[in-house]
Image (tube, rainbow, N blue to C red):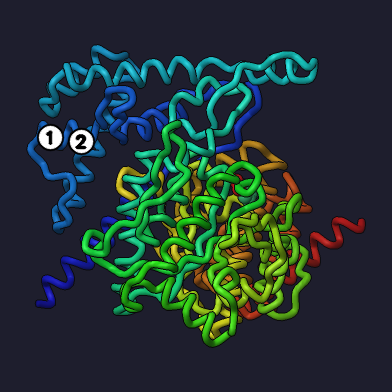
Amino acid sequence: MIWIERDARVAALHEELLEIEQRLIPTGLHLFGRAAELHEKADLLRAVAMFDRPEHGTRSLPSLIAEALGLDADATTSRAADTTELVDEIVSQAVRQFCDQGVQPASTWLKLRAGVDQSKSLPTFRLLAQISEQLDLNHEIESLMSALRGRYIEPGPGADIVQNPLVLPTGRNTHAVNPYSIPSRTAFLRAKATAQALLDRYVAEHGRYPRALALVLWGLDNIKTQGEGVAQALWLLGVRPVRDALNRATDVEVIPLAELKRPRMDVVITVSGIFRDLFAPTMALLDKAVRRVATLDEPAEMNYLRRNVLEQIDRATLNFDDAVTRVFSNAPGSYGTNVNFMVIESQWDSAAALGDLFVTRKCFAYGRKSDGRMIEGHEAKTLMDEALTRVEATYQNIDSFEVGITDVDHYFEYLGGISRAVETRTNCRPSIYLADSLAAQTRVRSLEETIRLETRARTLNPKWYEGMLRHGFRGVAEIENHVTNTFGWSATADAVDPWIYTEIAQTFLLDPVMYERLRELNPDSLRSLAERLFETHERGFWNPNEEILERLRDVMNELQRMQTA
Ligand code: BEZ
Ligand code: MG
């Protein structure tokens, strides 16, 4: 028994290591007007080759290889990690062959190495060739000049290269999507598995479904994924979009409980200002879905939304329209939560202040009342407070490998902000989850797991920070930003393991060679980094040993002296 357990632990560890190793990370900042270098290109092409692309008539290299070798790529046995590793190694070599020699030789190599039928691999390599060519083109400077002269710039879709290679070449005028097409059929299909994985994860941890979930939806993400976040919300409610004669998703159809095979969830949906501006019809669709589900004649234990709405009508003496309010955003014309500014400027005394600010900024309701009147950004703080009091899980879908949750301050301002708001309204910290909708198979992770993964793949990864440091001054600022954004997850969600701060201190401050390099390049950012670590300690998120504390004080003193000298 002990052996089996030990093997299982080793297999799990192995899988985690592979996950970190294979995580696609930016290895430097984009230089405006400059085409990708060969090694960046190889990494991108490899990521592109990981997905089946029916719209281009191409299959993913892993699926072709697994099929040809007779391997079950989806197996979840202890051998799965070995299989994945073997397949990934062949994919990497095939992409290298392609970069060095081109389409035909790569396809021939793959036939010899893994027995993949060339008629199947050629379309994939041809697609890679097309993308590779477009990566070499760069019209960014010309386009900028055209824009400054008020001239025409060719439009292109918004997404990242892995999701939609048609975004290339860069330097075009990014356009959004037709909001009525949201969610696309593909997005709705993919969202089914993600929503299920989210609920499975919660049930595995708690033995039951959450009373309600709070979801964060962003505009750019739903452009890039054609509405996967929206589709996940619809799945949680147990409805599917219905298209009208003009193919516009303007209505929903209830998925019967017999088909859903689980209760309908209650979802409190907070959307960004950008989402509100871009997706008015989608906001209406979400509100319609919530109202439809709340009026279904179903047993309370199979329809959590209805159960909660009835309870709100009963206990909080709300009318139906108020009790069913679930779609919130900023006031019209306003954007963001400001939670990030409050954290970055160290302007908060109690944790509750961060959640309260979130609600103050985001408590504007959108939808349509039972009598048909529109609600367009009507302030509804008590209704949002009320809706949040039943939330036990918070969630956001991550759409892109380009931007991770410690790269920018927006993830902690939104997902962190709402999680803190829930915590102070329920006296219980919600379970916080994220999903990678960028992988072929979506993975749901806890916030803590995601922070560990991103810290290992980025902030503490020499490939990442050396890539940043190639940019000198700006690179140090990027490292400091990551530390601040990591701190943002402590401030809003207590989600950062103390070892992370210890390793950051050791890597950037205690290592004398690294410290000197950073000090030379950008003493200002280095001082901010040291001060932020000190604040982390002062606020009780980290309890470093005396040696580290001493060093932090020394560094702050030295850099302070430098600045005043
Ligand atoms: C959005 O796409 O909605 C968004 C982008 C950046 C920050 C917050 C929201
Ligand atoms: Mg900054």
Furthest residue toward right: 565
Q: Residue 324's spot in the image, x, y percent?
A: 53, 69
Q: Residues within 10 Å of mark 1 (few under 14, many from 20)?
A: some
Tell me where residue 119 sits by quadrant: top left
Residue 259 visible at all: yes
Q: Residues within 10 Å of mark 2 (few under 14, many from 20)?
A: some
Label annotation for residue 67:
1
Whether pointer 1 and pointer 2 mark residues with C-beta atoms closer than 8 Å, the reply is: yes
Q: Quadrant of the N terminus?
A: bottom left
SS at circle 1: helix
Label annotation for residue 151:
none
Q: Is residue 397 shown above or below 143?
A: below
* Residue pictured at 16% horizontal, 73% vertical: 5
Q: Which residue is mark 2?
A: 63
Residue 513 visible at all: no
Q: Residue 150's spot in the image, x, y percent?
A: 78, 17
SS at circle 2: helix
Report the side of 522 relative to 533 (left or right).
right
